[in-house]
Image (cartoon, rainbow, N blue to C red):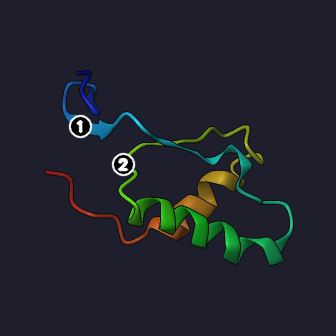
Amino acid sequence: MPSTTFRIGGDLTVGRLGFGAMHLPTEKPEDRPSAIAVARRAVDLGITLIDTAHMYGNGANEEVLAEALHPYPKIS
């Protein structure tokens, strides 16, 4: 049976099932609370890998995720 996790950079273990953040809404300010809630729920459900890119809303995607996930847990 294949592992459900893998290591990034040899140091950080993350789950193979990730969250693709490309579809988080970032254009309308009224959509921000729902985007934050979705990102937080993904983490609450155990997601440890989030795929994002600067091209998703010209960085707005990362801003939503930063707000949703702060304060960041310590990585051990």
Q: Secondary structure at mark 1?
A: strand
* Label 2 neighbour load within 10 Å: few <14, some 14-19, many 20+: some
Residue type at mark 2: give it.
Thr
Q: Secondary structure at mark 2?
A: loop
Does residue 24 lie above or below 35 as drawn?
above
Which numbered disc, 2 or 1, marks the residue that appears first in the sequence?
1
Question: Can you give x and y, in whole percent of width and height, for residue 13 in the image?
Answer: 23, 37
Residue type at mark 1: give it.
Thr
**Residue drawn 77% across and 59% down?**
25
Question: Can you give x and y, in whole percent of width and height, for residue 74 in the image?
Answer: 21, 60
**Residue drawn 41% across and 43% down?**
49
Is residue 40 rendered to the left or right of residue 56? left
Q: Are marks 2 and 1 in contact (CB under 8 Å)?
A: yes
Check the picture and name the quadrant holding the N terminus: top left
**Residue drawn 28% across and 33% down?**
4
Does residue 35 lie above or below 50 as drawn?
below
Q: CA distance from mark 2 to mark 1?
A: 8 Å
Residue for badge 2 = 48
Q: Which mark is residue 13?
A: 1
Q: Residue furthest front?
A: 1
Is residue 15 rendered to the left or right of residue 43? left
**Residue drawn 60% across and 53% down?**
62
Question: Can you give x and y, in whole percent of width and height, for residue 7 in the image?
Answer: 25, 28
Q: Residue furthest left?
A: 76
